[in-house]
Image (cartoon, rainbow, N blue to C red):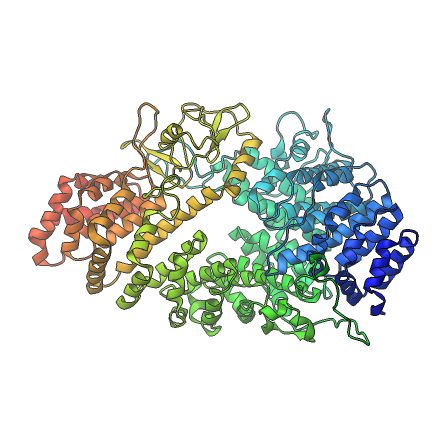
């Protein structure tokens, strides 16, 4: 009976030594399978008693088994377990020599990690970190022990998988050990024949444990490009693909999709006929010399050969397994491919070809398997893990590639995903708590944290349904991500738009206080966990990219109210996701725009725009930018008044971050991102394509207090430097720093790639600089949309802007944005460097719209000499859109409103342009390589001559 667990019984367990073993066995038999007795035992302080039992190995085994039973009871037991020091007690047991104690401790630790994972991934409350001190050494020793059983290795991998949660990174040593085990299995199973003289790989693991190893690796690398590349470039895997017996030299290209992963005896995968990738380049028609590829990762064809070989190898595992094991392997394939896709923004042709090969291979061999898993998961019973993972794996696989999305749709993925999404909203029958003839007393020592249960989590049935629902929503978002309305129309025809809207409803607070347990069933309108709400926002954002759907299905679904509710949610991730949906819903062609305005979205967005959270600020300004387009004059003035002109100027100038050390008013940054390589030389972490030497190798990454070094570094701004040969003008194409060098260095080392990826992911200062740059861009666009209107409104709004901000102040800002970030230096061989292309484009578009107003406003701009002087170099910008924007400024300035404006108005404006040297620049673009630029230049020349 429940009443058998009393404070006296717990105290007897503490004091007795001779009969302690019998008491422990009785307690274990009493609480196993009985949640009420577990709760009562915890409230009476049993955890503090259990971790003090050290009399013998047998008593410790019994105490550990009791702890394991309590740890597996649910998320509410995590807080008292951690407060009592159970994690340390279990880790100490793992380090003992008694095998029974080691096994019991590992199993209890697995139960604790599983419950902690529930808290970390489903609860709205803050999660206490799991203190696994010295776990890395313990894992490495046990996992690499010769003769380790599959059961023990699976338990070890499960602990790693449960604890590898976003925000709680796992030690990379564990990842390297897992990679070594995986390569050892590949050699032992005959996948590859390793004839290298030196091999430090561990003994091959039992084949039954390989899926768990893949699962642990996938959990570690998920959400991190750095950790994924660390897996790809780990020493065991690099040796696996360079030491196999195919011949002499680097023959990793023989394991490409074209050859089907040759292993010396044949192909592990079907070879594919892949046509050459067609690339169109205009480099010869417009003379631009790329000095440094600042925004590219610097990968070579050999690097991609190795990465493609890893993808093919993992794909072989997926084809060898079925069911949940296949899903685990495919997930790792998707994560590796996603990391490779994030690597190349403007790659050379050899990299494009190898990327094309990999995508073709995945489309033929991986996508059909993933779709089949989704289909099979719909036939699985309640609670099956494949249900939770199948749709999520498909989403990971296809989200970054349009070709993969098209292949999945052709394989009928939308049909099966929509079935999963609908079924995940079926009413959930909750298991009833164990009946007791008497109400259990909740008394006990509640003064201690180890005697108080934590916040109750959701029932396991609900957790399963939420994960299934999230995966299906992620798949809907991935399949409708690209600009293809046919995919979106298929989703609408499947009737799941209502499910997306239902997913936007979060759980109320009572569900986290145990209220859900008193209900017999949980319906579709009772709410969702935060991960489901985020996935629903992502799906709504993807679906709202369609003009047709915004006017039909999404309008009927009434998205406005749930989105406004989410924008007031206490979780900042939910507010950000809802604001991202607003970016699409507030477009001029969206009927939902009126509903959102009626729900007072403007004050919310303006308040968020002034938030300290830079991501929320960027998205809010972005949404306001769309809202202002084609809006009435009164509404535009309301938005500007809510934001305040001072804030808008600050956002455009880039003053939201530390202007003294990180950013300046024209979109540039002064952050120093260089570090020493293995040879002790200074390298730019963000621009590794040639691994050039820093002109001043004495600069050290951590020497931030050296003011003289900082001054020298100001000339090494961020971004790819493009040289236009005729004008010797250099442009910054991204917010990543670049330096000019004299001679190439050897091929980039793996350690440099990993160091740079880690810097990009973990440097919060650098992330804030990137976000601040985007904020500047959207703030400039917001002001442009503010004055973009018909003739009368344009004049009135431009006048309002000049009055509210000040014409001189605004034009000074535009001149600063167009001016060089740094001047040329013959001593250090650094060129004149300008702002990034997005900042330049937004600045020029705003300038062009200011010129489209009244003649007096045009004259105001022409009278500001710094703007004209700063405009001159950009007529030879390597990007056609920038040259086109410059011409738009001239076309608007020389436009004749009427005959009264022709003389002296237009003629004076043309005279001023001619005196500034701009007419010559315009005429020089008549023969431009870009057709759009040529035609616009002809219009500008015609207006200049006609004036």
Q: Is residue 69 left or right of residue 881?
A: right
Q: Quadrant of the N terminus?
A: bottom right
Q: Residue at x 58, y 36 (%)?
A: 305
Residue 386 screen position, x and y as percent: 70, 58
- From where the camera sits, is residue 412 visible? no
Q: Is residue 516 left or right of residue 718?
A: right
Task: In this rendered view, identify the residue nearer to me: 406 or 431.
Answer: 431
Q: Is residue 833 left or right of residue 671?
A: left
Task: In this rendered view, identify the residue nearer to me: 267 or 910.
Answer: 910
The image quadrant that residue 118 belongs to is bottom right
Task: In this rendered view, identify the residue nearer to me: 389 or 270.
Answer: 389
Residue 443 screen position, x and y as percent: 75, 67
Residue 900 screen position, x and y as percent: 7, 58
Q: Residue at x 54, y 42 (%)?
A: 355
The image quadrant that residue 20 belongs to is bottom right
Q: Residue at x 46, y 58 (%)?
A: 483
Residue 210 screen position, x and y as percent: 74, 45
Q: In the rendered image of this protein, does residue 314 appear above or below residue 592?
A: above
């Amino acid at each position: 009976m429940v009443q058998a667990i009393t404070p006296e019984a717990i105290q007897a367990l503490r004091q007795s030594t001779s009969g302690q073993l019998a008491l422990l066995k009785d307690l274990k038999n009493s609480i196993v399978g009985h949640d009420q007795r577990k709760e009562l035992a915890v409230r009476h302080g049993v955890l503090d008693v259990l971790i003090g039992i050290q009399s013998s190995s047998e008593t410790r085994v019994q105490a550990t088994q009791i702890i394991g039973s309590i740890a597996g009871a649910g998320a509410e037991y995590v807080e008292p377990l951690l407060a009592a020091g159970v994690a340390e007690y279990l880790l100490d047991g793992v380090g003992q020599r008694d095998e029974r104690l080691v096994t019991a401790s590992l199993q209890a630790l697995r139960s604790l990690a599983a419950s902690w994972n529930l808290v970390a991934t489903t609860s709205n409350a803050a999660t206490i970190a799991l203190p696994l001190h010295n776990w890395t050494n313990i894992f490495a020793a046990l996992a690499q022990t010769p003769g380790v059983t599959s059961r023990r290795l699976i338990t070890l991998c499960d602990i790693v998988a449960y604890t590898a949660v976003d925000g709680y990174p796992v030690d990379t040593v564990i990842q390297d050990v897992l990679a070594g085990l995986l390569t050892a299995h590949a050699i032992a199973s005959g996948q590859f024949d390793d004839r290298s003289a030196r091999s430090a790989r561990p003994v091959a693991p039992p084949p039954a444990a390989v899926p768990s190893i893949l699962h642990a690796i996938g959990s570690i690398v998920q959400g991190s490009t750095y950790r994924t590349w660390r897996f790809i470039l780990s020493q065991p895997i690099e040796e696996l693909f360079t030491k196999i017996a195919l011949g002499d030299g680097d023959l990793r290209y023989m394991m490409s999709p074209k050859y089907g992963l040759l292993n010396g005896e044949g192909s592990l995968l079907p070879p594919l006929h892949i046509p050459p990738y067609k690339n169109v380049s205009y480099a010869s028609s417009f003379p631009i010399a790329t000095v440094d590829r600042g925004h590219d990762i610097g990968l070579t064809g050999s690097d991609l050969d190795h990465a493609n070989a890893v993808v093919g190898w993992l794909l072989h595992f997926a084809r060898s397994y079925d069911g949940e094991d296949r899903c685990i392997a495919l997930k790792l394939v998707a994560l590796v491919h996603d990391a490779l896709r994030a690597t190349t923004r403007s790659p050379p042709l050899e990299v494009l070809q190898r990327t094309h090969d990999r995508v073709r291979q995945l489309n033929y061999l991986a996508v059909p398997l993933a779709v089949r898993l989704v289909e099979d998961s719909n036939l699985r019973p309640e609670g099956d893990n494949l249900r939770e993972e199948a749709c999520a794996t498909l989403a990971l696989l296809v989200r970054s590639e349009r070709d993969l999305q098209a292949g999945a749709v052709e394989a009928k993925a939308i049909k099966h995903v929509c079935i999963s999404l609908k079924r995940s909203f079926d009413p959930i029958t909750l298991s009833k708590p164990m009946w007791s003839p008497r109400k259990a007393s909740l008394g006990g020592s509640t003064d201690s944290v180890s005697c108080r249960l934590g916040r109750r989590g959701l029932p396991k049935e609900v957790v399963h349904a939420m994960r299934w629902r999230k995966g299906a929503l992620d798949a809907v978002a991935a399949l409708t991500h690209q600009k293809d309305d046919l995919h979106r129309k298929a989703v609408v025809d499947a009737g799941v738009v209502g499910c997306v809207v239902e997913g936007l409803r979060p759980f109320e607070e009572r569900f986290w206080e145990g209220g859900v347990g008193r209900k017999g069933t949980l319906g579709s309108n009772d709410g969702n966990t935060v991960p489901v709400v985020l996935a629903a926002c992502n799906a709504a954002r993807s679906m709202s990219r369609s003009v047709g759907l915004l006017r039909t299905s999404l309008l009927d679904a009434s998205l406005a109210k749930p989105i406004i509710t989410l924008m007031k949610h206490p979780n900042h991730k939910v507010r950000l996701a809802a604001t991202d949906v607003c970016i699409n819903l507030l477009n001029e062609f969206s009927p939902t725009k009126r509903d959102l305005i009626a729900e007072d979205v403007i004050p919310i967005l303006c308040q968020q725009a002034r938030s300290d959270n830079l991501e929320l600020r960027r998205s809010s300004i972005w949404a306001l930018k769309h809202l202002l387009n084609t809006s009435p004059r009164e509404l535009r003035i309301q938005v500007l008044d809510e934001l305040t002109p001072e804030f808008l100027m600050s956002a455009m100038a880039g003053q939201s971050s530390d202007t003294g050390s990180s950013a300046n008013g024209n979109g540039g940054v002064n952050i120093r991102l260089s570090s020493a390589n293995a040879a002790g030389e200074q390298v730019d972490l963000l621009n590794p394509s040639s691994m050039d030497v820093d002109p001043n190798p004495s600069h050290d990454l951590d020497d931030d207090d050296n003011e003289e070094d900082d001054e020298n570094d100001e000339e090494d701004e961020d971004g790819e430097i493009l040289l236009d040969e005729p004008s010797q003008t250099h442009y910054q194409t991204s917010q990543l720093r670049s330096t000019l060098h004299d001679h190439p260095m050897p091929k980039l080392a793996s350690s440099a790639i990993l160091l740079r990826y880690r810097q990009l992911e973990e440097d919060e200062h650098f992330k804030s600089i990137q976000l601040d740059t985007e904020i500047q861009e959207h703030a400039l666009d917001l002001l442009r949309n503010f004055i973009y209107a018909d003739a009368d409104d344009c004049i009135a709004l431009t006048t309002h802007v000049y009055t509210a901000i000040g014409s001189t102040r605004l034009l000074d800002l535009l001149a600063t944005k167009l001016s060089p970030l740094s001047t040329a230096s013959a001593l250090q061989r650094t060129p004149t460097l300008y702002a990034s292309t997005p900042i330049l484009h937004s600045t020029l578009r705003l300038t062009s719209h200011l010129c489209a107003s009244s003649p007096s406003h045009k004259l105001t701009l022409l009278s500001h000499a710094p703007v004209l002087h700063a405009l001159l170099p950009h007529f030879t910008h390597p990007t056609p859109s920038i040259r086109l924007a410059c011409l738009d400024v001239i076309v608007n300035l020389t436009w004749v409103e009427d005959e009264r404006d022709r003389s002296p108005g237009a003629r004076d404006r043309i005279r001023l342009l001619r005196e500034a040297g701009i007419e010559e620049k315009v005429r020089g673009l008549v023969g431009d390589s870009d057709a759009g630029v040529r035609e616009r230049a002809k219009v500008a020349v015609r207006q200049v001559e006609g004036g």
